[in-house]
Amino acid sequence: MEHDITDPLALEIDAIFNLACPASLKSYQLDPIGTTRTCVLGAMNVLDIATRRNCRVFQASTSEVYGDPAQHPQVEGYFGNVNPIGPRACYDEGKRLAETLFFDYHRMRGVDIRVARIFNTYGPRMKTNDGRVVPNFVAQALAEDLLTVYGGGAQTRSFCYVDDLVDCILAMMAAGPEAIGPINLGAPFEMTVLALAEMIQRLTGAGSGIVNIQLPEDDPFQRRPDISRAQAVLGWTPRVEPEEGIMRVINHFSATESARFTKVPA
């Protein structure tokens, strides 16, 4: 069924995966008030359902709760460095408040929760105009357009392939109370944005260059999860290396957008 998560809903269900929120900067800044409502009212509504049904509920939180981190890599005990009034705050603070609600419902009402802080994730079926760095670069490279790198490209991100992330989410939901969280879910494959752009140029055989544009406000300079807790509690380690995962995205984009893009070399 299709339903706006900001509106209350009565359902007969056994478990809830709350993944409702735009996750790219481009998407969540289109309607920042709506993004905050989705994070906060959506969390309350799914928690109310979980309370009534006495069922387990998963919250997709985010690495953005750490803001522009002063601690690297980021561990779950780090409280973060978030600008509460900046243009990213609708998402950053919305997710932080959702975590607050989850743990308050757990403490006060006994709701069985799981909270994961998800780091940069990518995969084949992302939209080519999603606004996030992997689909941006792949689409631009296949079209022989300039790759747009924010700032000088020295900022780092750690990229997790979607299959690895889904495996860990399911493991978290199947685990006992030791997996309540928060738990960082992501891959420790840290690289600069410029290195990612150069990798995608190489893998696509793109002859286009790189253009530098202004860095967005409050853009984090470093981002890499400490996944010790996920490894210890869930026995999970990501398996898909960045080059393999990026190649899957390239092949998918090339096959589905062949009318627009140059074919990827065999």
Image: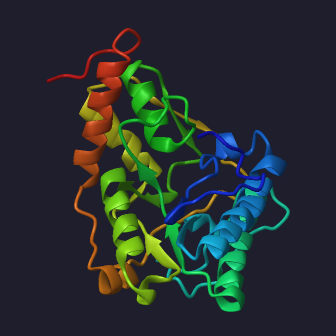
Hey, which quadrant is residue 143 in on the image?
A: top left
Looking at the rendering, in which quadrant would you find the C terminus? top left
Camera sees residue 68: no
Hey, which quadrant is residue 89 in on the image?
A: bottom right
Measuring from the top left, give residue 130's x and y in whole percent. 55, 35
Looking at the image, the residue that sits furthest to the front is 12
Looking at the image, the residue that sits furthest to the left is 266
Measuring from the top left, give residue 229's x and y in whole percent. 39, 84
User: Where 108 sits versus 248, above or below?
Assistant: below
Camera sees residue 180: yes
Image check: 237 left or right of 116? Answer: left
Residue at 32%, 79% (x, y): give it. 234
User: Where 77 sits versus 127, above or below?
Assistant: below
Residue nearest the viewer, comparing 117 with 204: 117
Residue at 36%, 65% (x, y): give it. 170
Hey, which quadrant is residue 52 in on the image?
A: bottom right
Image check: 207 left or right of 150? Answer: left
Residue at 85%, 63% (x, y): give it. 85
User: Where 209 sits versus 181, above or below?
Assistant: above
Residue at 31%, 53% (x, y): give it. 163
Image check: 44 left or right of 207? Answer: right
Q: How is the image coloured?
A: rainbow
Measuring from the top left, give residue 144's x and y in whole percent. 40, 19
Looking at the image, the residue that sits furthest to the top is 259
User: Where 239 sits versus 127, above or below?
Assistant: below
Number of numbered discs visible in the structure rendering: 0
Looking at the rendering, in which quadrant would you find the N terminus? top right
Residue nearest the viewer, comparing 31 with 152: 31
Residue nearest the viewer, comparing 201 with 129: 129
Measuring from the top left, give residue 106's x and y in whole percent. 64, 85
